């Protein structure tokens, strides 16, 4: 016999037996031919496992089991071999291997080049990793394990080139394109993204990157690092857990749950907001104001058990270092207050707030949402407040002492809530009116079912000040049983009149099919404010509207000018071109009348004896009212 022969042996194995089997074998010849006439031995046998032989550029480099083979280490990037070609053969149980597969050729990847081959950062709060990208267009992936529900920050501060960073929930999320913006389409599957920021520059603009995830679930996340315009260089990747909040330009609520005193560092306002003071305009709470641009602080130290409202002039990340405070209960007497959120995760209003008696209303300054049980604005109703978010604060009024306890809602006791994707809605203004400016003072107007019955689906209802500025607006869908219409007061930090003055008359208009109509509200006399005037923190309910066509005549009083503004106290009132006599009233910033006269010609107004600050000049005749904001410096 001059060729190899193959035999198969069928063995029946006891079903209870596991593992390999040692098998003795013997082959006996017929004594013809040369010796030996016998061959014998022992071999270990077990269930057959299919294996594959992998060849790189014709050389056998591995025999492996499975569906995916990773060839490593291989050089990549500039100077490396441009391409490698691979073929595979399959090993069989009783016959020779298969023929070679068709070649598969490509440029090699190394760890970090693919999300699936991400470097391990290990765990959030591990030490900073110092590494680099090495050529134009280079990028690198890292994976990180988040061990518990918490906020965590991904920072490239300290890098030496213009960086970008993004976070993904899984490798499947990336569509192969780098994120270019924060809207859903521009994120290309990322759940967080940043290009440039102010935190890395401690308040100054920085080309390095920092982003965060809020109340992130435990699990593995993937971080993508790359450079703007293909730049490359050395980077410092730091992933750490701290309370972090992305601020939004304008007014909103503000709170923190961190125990500032745990490390013995205190909680001075300057230290708490050190890295964001250039982006922070003002903070106001029950104790006073913090106005860093003017070195004013009447609040004192920061108190985590106090909420506040804040105005920001730029978007940034406010990062608060420390662990959550031990005492997560807060008690307030009857009155108007700001509720801080002393919890790592959002809390549903239903059950937490709805079960607390004596709450007249609660207002979300960030999203203009309302909880107002007597007005019918409760969770489930359009425009109702449904969730309380860490980092924010909520304006509320209570008629008696109330206590809020966040302990039952901590992540280790509660699975948290799922925020519907449409909760943060974008309001589209399709009218000819100005976009409403969100300010720090509000009056809540509720529209009852009977009032809504006088409106049509597609109508816009708006409130206007005497300047004709729209100060509150809602779109009617036709499905509402009740609707809240938040009205914005004047912004004390701006020069111009941009909202309602306290005690100013609320004017209502309806925009319908391109036409504007004046409407007269009928107020519910059983609500706190039913005189038709704007009141800071006021509550009114409209139970009906009476329609009348809006006159389109131009307001002649709008041509009046007041100059110079600001001034040291002497102002020129120019009413040239206006023939009829009018009334002029001057009010201080608290709405108090300090001067009144009649005008039939241009003249000077002398306020040099008045304290420095903001004043309002109200000019009106039988058919029109006009308001000017002036500043005595």
Image (spheres, rainbow, N blue to C red):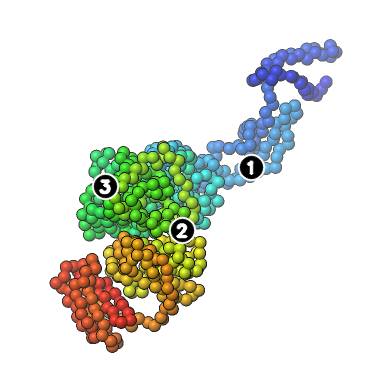
Nearer to us in this view, 230 or 324: 324
Which residue is at 51% across, 47% downward?
78
Query: Is the residue under label 3 in contact with that under label 1 (CB below 8 Å)?
Result: no
Q: Is residue 221 visible?
A: yes
Q: Is residue 337 visible?
A: no
Give the CA distance from mark 1 to mark 3: 65 Å
Q: Residues within 10 Å of mark 2 (few under 14, many from 20)?
A: some
The mark that comes first in sequence, 1 or 2, is 1
Total numbered badges shown on the rendered structure: 3
Circle 1 sits on which residue?
85
Is label 1 or label 3 in front? 3
Circle 2 sits on which residue?
382
Nearer to us in this view, 425 or 351: 351
139 above or below 66? below
Give the CA distance from mark 2 to mark 3: 34 Å
The mark that comes first in sequence, 2 or 3, is 3
Query: Is the residue under label 3 in contact with that under label 2 (CB below 8 Å)?
Result: no
The mark that comes first in sequence, 1 or 3, is 1
Q: Quadrant where the N terminus lies?
A: top right
Give the CA distance from mark 1 to mark 2: 61 Å
324 above or below 198? above
Circle 3 sits on which residue?
303
Q: Residues within 10 Å of mark 3 (few under 14, many from 20)?
A: some
**Helix, strand or loop for disc 3:** loop
Q: Quadrant of residue 80?
A: top right
x and y percentages locating residue 198 in the rendered image: 35, 54
Task: State left or right for residue 425 relative to residue 599.
Answer: right
């Amino acid at each position: 016999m001059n060729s190899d022969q193959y035999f198969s042996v069928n063995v029946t194995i006891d079903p209870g037996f596991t593992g390999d089997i040692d098998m003795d074998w013997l082959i006996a010849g017929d004594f013809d031919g040369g010796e030996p006439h016998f061959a014998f031995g022992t071999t270990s046998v077990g269930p057959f496992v299919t294996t594959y032989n992998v060849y790189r550029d014709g050389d056998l480099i591995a025999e492996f089991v499975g569906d995916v083979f990773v060839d490593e280490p291989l050089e990549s990037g500039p100077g490396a071999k441009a391409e490698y070609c691979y073929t595979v053969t399959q090993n069989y149980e009783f016959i020779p291997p298969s023929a070679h597969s068709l070649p598969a050729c490509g440029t090699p990847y190394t760890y970090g080049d693919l999300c699936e081959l991400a470097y391990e950062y290990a765990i959030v709060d591990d030490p900073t990793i110092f590494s680099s990208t090495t050529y134009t267009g280079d990028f690198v992936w890292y994976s990180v394990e988040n061990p518990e529900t918490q906020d965590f920050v991904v920072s490239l501060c300290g890098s030496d080139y213009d960086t970008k960073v993004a976070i993904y929930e899984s490798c499947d999320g990336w569509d192969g394109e780098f994120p270019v913006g924060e809207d859903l389409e521009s994120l290309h599957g990322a759940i967080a993204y940043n290009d440039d920021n102010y935190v890395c520059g401690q308040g100054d603009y920085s080309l390095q990157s920092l982003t965060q995830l809020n109340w992130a679930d435990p699990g593995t996340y993937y971080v993508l690092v790359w450079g703007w315009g293909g730049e490359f260089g050395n980077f410092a990747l730091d992933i750490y857990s701290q309370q972090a909040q992305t601020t939004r330009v304008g007014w909103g609520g503000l709170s923190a749950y961190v125990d500032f005193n745990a490390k013995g560092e205190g909680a001075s306002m300057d230290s708490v907001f050190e890295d964001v003071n250039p982006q922070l305009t003002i903070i106001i709470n029950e104790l006073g104001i913090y106005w860093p641009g003017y070195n004013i602080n009447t609040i004192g130290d920061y108190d985590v058990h106090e909420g506040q409202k804040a105005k920001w002039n730029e978007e940034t990340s406010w990062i608060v270092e420390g662990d959550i405070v031990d005492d997560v209960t807060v008690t307030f007497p009857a009155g108007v207050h700001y509720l801080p959120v002393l919890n790592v995760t959002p809390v549903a209003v239903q059950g937490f707030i709805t079960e607390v008696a004596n709450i007249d209303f609660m207002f979300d300054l960030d999203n203009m949402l309302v909880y107002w049980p007597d007005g019918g604005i409760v969770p489930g109703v359009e425009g109702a407040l449904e969730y309380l978010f860490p980092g924010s604060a909520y304006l509320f009024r209570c008629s008696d002492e109330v206590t809020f306890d966040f302990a039952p809602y901590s992540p280790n006791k509660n699975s948290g809530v799922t925020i519907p994707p449409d909760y943060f809605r974008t309001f589209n203004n399709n009218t000819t009116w100005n976009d409403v400016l969100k300010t720090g003072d509000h009056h809540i107007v509720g529209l009852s079912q009977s009032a809504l019955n006088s409106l049509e689906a597609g109508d816009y209802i708006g409130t206007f000040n005497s300047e004709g500025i729209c100060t509150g607006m809602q779109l009617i869908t036709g499905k509402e049983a009740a609707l809240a219409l938040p009205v914005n007061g004047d912004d004390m930090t701006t020069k111009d009149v941009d909202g309602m003055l306290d005690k100013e008359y609320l004017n209502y208009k309806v925009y319908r099919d391109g036409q504007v109509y004046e409407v007269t509200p009928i107020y519910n006399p059983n609500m706190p404010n039913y005189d038709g005037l704007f009141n800071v923190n006021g509550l009114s309910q409209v139970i009906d509207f009476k329609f009348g066509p809006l006159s389109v005549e131009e307001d002649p009083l709008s041509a009046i000018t007041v100059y110079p503004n600001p001034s040291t106290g002497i102002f020129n009132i120019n009413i040239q071109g206006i023939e009829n006599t009018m009334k002029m009233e001057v009010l201080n910033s608290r709405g108090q009348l300090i001067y009144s006269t009649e005008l039939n010609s241009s003249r000077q107004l002398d306020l040099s004896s008045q304290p420095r600050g903001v004043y309002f000049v109200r000019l009106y005749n039988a058919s029109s009212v006009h308001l000017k904001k002036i500043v005595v410096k």
